Amino acid sequence: MTRLTLAIDAMGGDFGPCVTVPAALQALASHSQLFLLLVGHPDTLTPLLAKADSSLLGRLQVIPAESVIASDARPAQAIRNSRGSSMRVALEMVKEGRAQACVSAGNTGALMGLATLILKPLDGIKRPALMSVLPHQQQGKTVVLDLGANVGSDSAMLVQFAVMGSVMAEHVLGISRPRVALLNIGHEETKGLETIRDAAVILRESPQINYIGYLEGNELLTGKTDVMVCDGFVGNVTLKTMEGVVRMFLSLLKSSGEGKKRSWWLQLLGRWIQKRLVKRFGHLNPDQYNGACLLGLRGTVIKSHGAANQQAFVVAIEQAEQAVRQQVPERIAARLDAVLARSDKA
């Protein structure tokens, strides 16, 4: 395994260095070939590294940045004023070849805009898409995109998302000829927006895509498809609704029975049931799949949840490592020509 260098926007997210620095050290401890560039204010980052093991510090470098893009900043304004920011410097590390991927928990719109501006989309890609890999009830995983990079998407973009999602499912998840579905309000061909119906026509005629038709939102976690495609508005709402429900469910499991007076054997039985349920459904915890990959660029960019805790940010770093080692951008570029050339003729 060869050395891999990632640039970390250490100032981004709701908690900034309080989460990103410990997460970076944890990732270094778990991955011996990993080297990290922590981009941010040296005066803020250095004290957090004071007690770190010297063997880890040998694979870590602090890269100075002058400013931080606020999480609530308007993307257009943030991009105009981004020079010297931790997010932009981290992305420039990738462009210059000093890092092979960038990880940030910062402003999503700014990251999308800056990554597109600095790294450029692959030939044949209109707009990048945010992609995440979600667990489903059959103990497998489903690639879902777009999760918020594009509020609206035309049929050509949905087809491009399908291509990119297929590559991810095939080469990262190891699924041969992955099933692809469009998220819609019904299974019938006449249902849904015109853009979705037009994309369906193109996908049905593309032998390179194993298109299986429409699926509804309640089928997202069933394992009926390996790739679920939708526009960014629908995808973002779907993801956050699902995460909210899962967090509430897991919270109820952990807290059920607290404060109630029961006999010792009922308490013991209750704790055993809770542990079994948490073990059975714990893989659905959003912290276990944090990190959305911005697909369609000439480099690898991972967007972490802004509210990610330390363990969740470690997962985002590991997502970046996996995407780089699987050469995702290169594989997407290699797959695009045949499908998109056929789409242009449709």
Image (cartoon, rainbow, N blue to C red):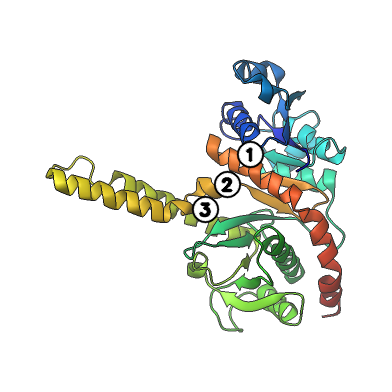
* Quarter of the rendering occupied by the N terminus: top right
Let me know if residue 304 appears in the view.
no
Write the residue at 16% across / 49% down.
266
- Position of residue 104 measured from the top left corner of the image (x, y, whole percent): 67, 39
Q: In the rendered image, which residue does mark 2 sit on?
A: 290
- Percent position of residue 179, x then y: 64, 73
* Mark 3 residue type: Lys
Q: Is residue 334 above or below residue 13?
A: below
Callouts 2 and 1 close, C-beta under 8 Å: no
Which of the labelled discs sits on residue 283, or is there none? none
Residue 285 horizontal/vertical position (percent): 47, 50
Pointer 3 residue: 240
Residue type, label 2: Asn
Q: Residues within 10 Å of mark 1 (few under 14, many from 20)?
A: many
- The residue under label 1 is 105
Label 3 – label 2 distance at C-alpha = 12 Å
User: Please, which residue is most extreme toward the front here?
Assistant: 1
Residue 116 appears at what percent x and percent y? 80, 48
Side of 137 where 102 appears, left or right? right
